[in-house]
Image (cartoon, rainbow, N blue to C red):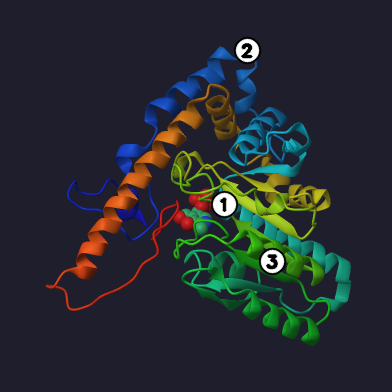
Amino acid sequence: MSSANEAPPDNLVNFGCGHPDYALLPVDEIASATQQALLDDPNGRKWLQYGRENGNYPARAAIAEFLTNLYHTDSTSHAIDPETLFVTSGVSHGIQLTCRTLDRVHRQRQQEDANEAPLCWVEDPTYFLVPPIFEQAGYELEAVRTSPDNGLDLSDLETKIRAARTASPDRLLVLYCIPIHHNPLGVSLSEETRTQLIHLCKANEVYLIADEVYHGLGFPGTTSSPTAMAMRGSSPYIVSVSAFTKLLCPGIRCGWIQTSNRDLLHQIGQEGVLDSGGCSSQLSSGIVRQLIQNGKLDSYLAALQAEYAKRCQHLCQLLQDVSEGSEYPFQFDFAVPQGGYFL
Ligand SMILES: Cc1ncc(COP(=O)(O)O)c(C=O)c1O
């Protein structure tokens, strides 16, 4: 991890992990937004104080406004409610808070009957650093098939859900999946699959933790921007986790959990670490709010989408040349991504 965190030599492109290019990091935008958030606002000091467990309201209101625009849900009836958002210090943190809380609450409800480890399904392949988050929270993991073109295999998932429910009707069941610009497959779930997945989870009381960290990185002109999974219907079983990690920079450590399940959000706020420390990203959520309000996040993101589209096109062309070239002894296919980091 440490070598990947340093600027690579100029002639080297590191494909080993999903880190943004050093040259693209928004240094000036963050520096001036920090100044504005702290000094230009007469109440700027609040960002240096402890914050509410779920994040200060002005930060959540700004994130809600940003997401309402991102998902094109601009009619007032569909505007995102800040009370459905919980500020985190990134997606990894959001996943950890959610899976720990689900287990804690489930055990309290089951009382002495809850000896069984909770079960979490992950896609095969999945984001390679996610399994330890669930395992360290006491979950057993099981892989679900995917296809390179369509992502998550719903029929395999359904078979596994039925088997798990038959074996243990009261077990806590969770699915972690990456519905948009998947890491590492690059695919996004179709509208139909999204709808079916939500029904399947709801009907079988399976919690879905949808990691949407690449949402917002659709290439210009190629992708529609589906709403977050948590906004489809009002199922208490659906939780979206996302962050500004890829939309701004990883170092900002600011993200959110989104769900219509208010009780779950309340329970997440009861996690000891938040009860003691308050909002985990108090200062950075103030900086992000500033970037949303002054329009810099939108303009940076538009430039990032265009740049990533250009780089992706370049990479696809190189791969195409390699695959068709006579000097290479192998051929391969690949799907051209619509956004995100992965091909
Ligand atoms: C799918 C996925 N989820 C989560 C993360 C980590 O997100 P964060 O840095 O916000 O914890 C990454 C980083 O590459 C990722 O690819």
Give the mark, 1 or 3, whose residue is nearer the N terminus.
1
Residue 217 place in picture, x, y as percent: 47, 46
What SS does tag 1 mark? helix
Q: Amino acid at mark 1?
A: Val
Q: Quadrant of the C terminus?
A: bottom left
Q: Tell me the mark number nearer the camera, choosing from 2 and 1.
A: 1
Q: Are marks 2 and 1 in contact (CB under 8 Å)?
A: no
Q: Quadrant of the N terminus?
A: bottom left
Q: Which residue is mark 3?
A: 197
Q: Amino acid at mark 2?
A: Pro
Q: Which mark is residue 42?
A: 2
Q: Tell me the mark number nearer the camera, choosing from 1 and 3.
A: 3
For the point 69% across and 48% down, which residue is it?
A: 258
Question: Does residue 14 show up?
Answer: no
Which one is nearer the viewer's eye here, 1 or 190? Answer: 190
Q: Are marks 1 and 3 in contact (CB under 8 Å)?
A: no
Question: Does residue 238 show up?
Answer: yes
Q: Which mark is residue 91?
A: 1
Say if disc 1 is inside 8 Å of ligand 1.
yes
Give the mark, 3 or 2, whose residue is nearer the N terminus.
2
What's the CA distance linking mark 2 and mark 1? 31 Å
Residue 109 place in picture, x, y as percent: 87, 66
Q: Residues within 10 Å of mark 3 (few under 14, many from 20)?
A: many
Q: Is residue 235 above or below residue 64?
A: below
Residue 114 placement: quadrant: bottom right
What SS does tag 3 mark? helix
For the point 20% across and 63% down, which residue is it?
A: 321
What's the CA distance linking mark 1 and mark 3? 21 Å
For the point 59% across and 64% down, which residue is it?
A: 177
Q: Is residue 184 above or below residue 6?
A: below
